[in-house]
Amino acid sequence: MENPKRIAVIGTGYVGLVAGACFADWGHRVTCVDLDAGRIDLLNRGGIPIYEPGLAEVVERAVKAGNLSFTTKVADAVAGCDAAYIAVGTPPSKTDGEADLSFVFECARQIARVIRPGAVIVTKSTVPVGTGDIVERIVEDARPGEHIPVVSNPEFLREGSAINDFTNPDRVVIGTEDEGAKATLLAIYQPLKARGHAVVVTRRRSAELIKYASNAFLAAKITFINEMADLCEAVEADVADIALGVGLDSRIGPHFLHAGPGYGGSCFPKDTLALIRTAQEHGVSLRIVEETVQANSARKRRMAMKVRHVLHGNVEGKKIAILGLTFKADTDDMRDSPAIPMIELLQRSGAEIHAYDPQGEANAKTLFEDVTFHEDPYGCAAQADAVVFMTDWEVLKHLDLARLASIMESPVMIDLRRIYPPEAAARQGFVVETIGRLGSEPHPVDAYAPTFLAQDIAAGTHRG
Ligand code: UDX
């Protein structure tokens, strides 16, 4: 590469590790840092601490090329670098759902101590508007009178398709008012610019807000189609056809119109709440985002009603097999997964829960009590009174339905990802409940009695 940069990336989570590995794969010289010695040790031994398809290959290639290394020492990585990336977590704070920025600020302090003048600090963690200003003040306090620009460079990758998203982004967003910093960032992303990817250079605050606005819009888009799914069930329409017909309008677009059990994950739930907070602090009300959060939360809980409904209103003592636990396929991430309220509510109603997930078991085990985990979907469904599809993992798309039906106590399927056409499943003996269209057994429109939901919200025992 023409103009390789020396880059330090602090934080080896989804964003930091993927960004570091891809930068190095493009030819930059990258050092990834994490304070977790076990994690760094694993990376140095060729292991990958997260499940992300394709990441291991990129890391291996970049390490072999001599462009990627790992350390626990911020100072070693940052001294001499051209750009120090902050890619540490911003978990929701325990008290009020606001993003907890303490890791970001601590990271900024550590970088500020050692970074050379002229190098830039780049925030890749998703941080509320104005955080760049605070980071800048931290740096100025540590290095009075020196010029060390702070840039916002938000990341839009999705878990499960992170490598492809990072290397083929719809756009790169760079937020800085500093010409030198702009040149450094443009050099870092030169390989993408050369391939024609859009690069948006804007004010730092605008860059910070673009990330939240994008996530909130996508969350609202999913919530919109989920509401259409409810309506489709009532009027005997099919939400997949609605999504197709609506999505072909180029002003709307076909993506993120797949109706499901409600969005989860590490970003949408947290970022929508953080955006509402930011707006409130500035006296602005974001009614669409607020409604999105509430509707999604209620939806996740309401999904348990579908299970209860199809089991004639009573799950007491019933064995229910949950297939797929993570918030979506191709990740081991359980954060804000719709499976969490599903399992909690069914357990509270007396159900016996069995579960299977190709990658999420270890994380799921930390969340649930009294759940029996299985190595494969058939073992999970054996003697069950119902199977519930929570995520559309590839392996779950190709089940032998006749076999599945034959080993269950009663072949009842609640397909919350619309994996199987209800007619096809019914032909194998299943009673099917799905979303966004009628299942094999039409149900009355008011089947999901709202009282269950009200009680649950009043109990307020889980996140949503
Ligand atoms: C999201 C954003 O897409 C990404 O740009 C940002 O950087 C981080 O947050 P991620 O959380 O990894 O990425 O997953 P994503 O694929 O966007 O899915 C989020 C949730 O929405 C999942 O629960 C998924 O099942 C749900 N979803 C998504 C739907 O229910 N329907 C859809 O059509 C799309």
Image: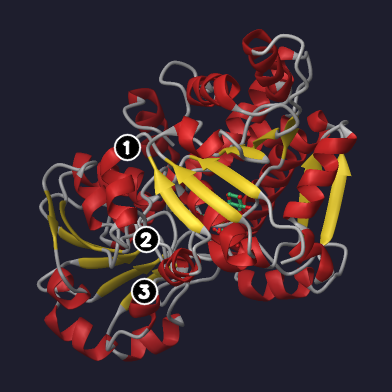
Name the secondary structure under disc 2.
loop
The quarter in which the N terminus is drawn is bottom right
Q: Is residue 48 visible?
A: yes
Instruction: Look at the numbered disc 3 and say if its residue's Cβ is closer than 8 Å to ligand 1.
Output: no
Q: Which residue is mark 3?
A: 432
User: Visible in this render: residue 417?
Assistant: no
Q: How many marks?
A: 3
Identity, as a three-letter code, of the amino acid under mark 3: Val
Q: Position of residue 383 (x, y in %)?
A: 10, 72
**Residue 213 location, x and y as percent?**
74, 40
Mark nearer the N terminus (3 vs 2) = 2
Type of amino acid at the residue the image marks with label 1: Asp
Name the residue that disc number 1 marks: 36
The answer to which of 292 and 2 lies nearer the viewer is 2
Using the image, determine if residue 96 lies above or below residue 396: above
Of label 2 and label 1, which has the lower sequence position? 1
Give the image's coloring scheme. secondary structure
Quarter of the C terminus within the rendering: top left
Residue at 29% x, 63% y is: 359
Task: Read off the residue under disc 2.
Answer: 51
Give residue 71's mark.
none
Q: Which numbered mark, 2 or 1, is in the foreground of this view?
A: 1
Q: Residues within 10 Å of mark 3 (few under 14, many from 20)?
A: many
Q: Disc 3, disc 2: CB below 8 Å?
A: no
Label 3 vs 1, first from the N-terminus: 1
Q: Residue at horizontal 14%, vertical 65%?
A: 374
Does 155 sit above or below residue 287?
A: below
Q: Nearer the viewer, mark 3 or mark 1?
A: 1
Residue 6 against residue 462 in the figure, above or below: below
Q: Relative to 169, is 305 on the left or the right?
A: left
Along the horizontal axis of the image, is 382 left or right of 396?
left
Q: CA distance from mark 2 to mark 1?
A: 17 Å
